[in-house]
Image (cartoon, helix red, strand yellow):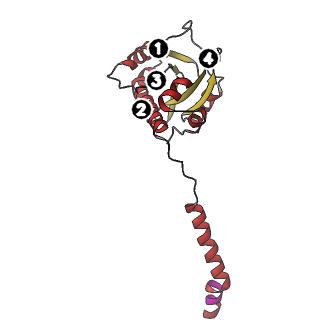
Amino acid sequence: MRNFLRSSCFGDQGRLWLVLLASAVILLFGCQAREAPLNPGIATFKQELKSCLDSIAITLLDPVARKDIAGVKAALEKVDSPAVKLCRMCPFEIVVLDPSGKILSAYPVKGDGKAKDYSSYDLVKKAISTKKIQQQGLFLPEGSKIYLVCAPLIRQDELIGLVAIAISSADAEKRWNLTEKDFLALDFNT
């Protein structure tokens, strides 16, 4: 019986299984893809945008949860205030959406000021379904390009709304040396 256990557990087959198991462990834990380090400008952009989103979210959570449009507008008007400590990048536009993608308010107010429905935008749909920050590049009608970042506003694991920030691609490239490829490759959820 002892010889049987010794030969079946530690014999040629046992050694083969041990080698296969060790190889699997090395492959599983040793060969995971790691995010490449960001260049300083792109890392600064990511940090500033995340800080901006965090500051805005704190300011907007209560009025958005109450569907208090006047409160949302008042909160957005304060984003330039040093007290809010918004990131230095002065976004092109900030839009606050309800959980279905309909606009509650925007800052600064552009166009006719009427509520728009962004619920059909893939970016918004993806942010709603995943409850994670999503980004996309878009062209404006006159041909300029903007970068959009759409972040869910979540309270107790419930989506109460979204904040979208639009940034001119030309400004982003000038300030942070951020290309579209770099922007799309960023993961704002880490």
Residue under circle 3? Answer: 65
The amino acid marked with disc number 4 is: Asp
| Res 51 label | 2
Disc 2 is placed on an element classified as helix
Q: Position of residue 60 (x, y in %)?
A: 43, 23
Q: Nearer the viewer, residue 31 or 5?
A: 31
Give how far apart the Cα atoms at labels 4 and 3 are: 19 Å
Q: Nearer the viewer, mark 4 or mark 3?
A: 4
Give how far apart the Cα atoms at labels 3 and 1 are: 10 Å
Give how far apart the Cα atoms at labels 4 and 2 are: 27 Å
Residue under circle 4? Answer: 117
Is residue 74 one of those drawn in magenta? no
The quadrant where residue 135 appears: top right
Residue drawn at (67%, 85%) of the image: 12
Neighbour class for label 3 at 10 Å: few (<14), some, many (≥20)?
some
Give how far apart the Cα atoms at labels 2 and 3 are: 21 Å
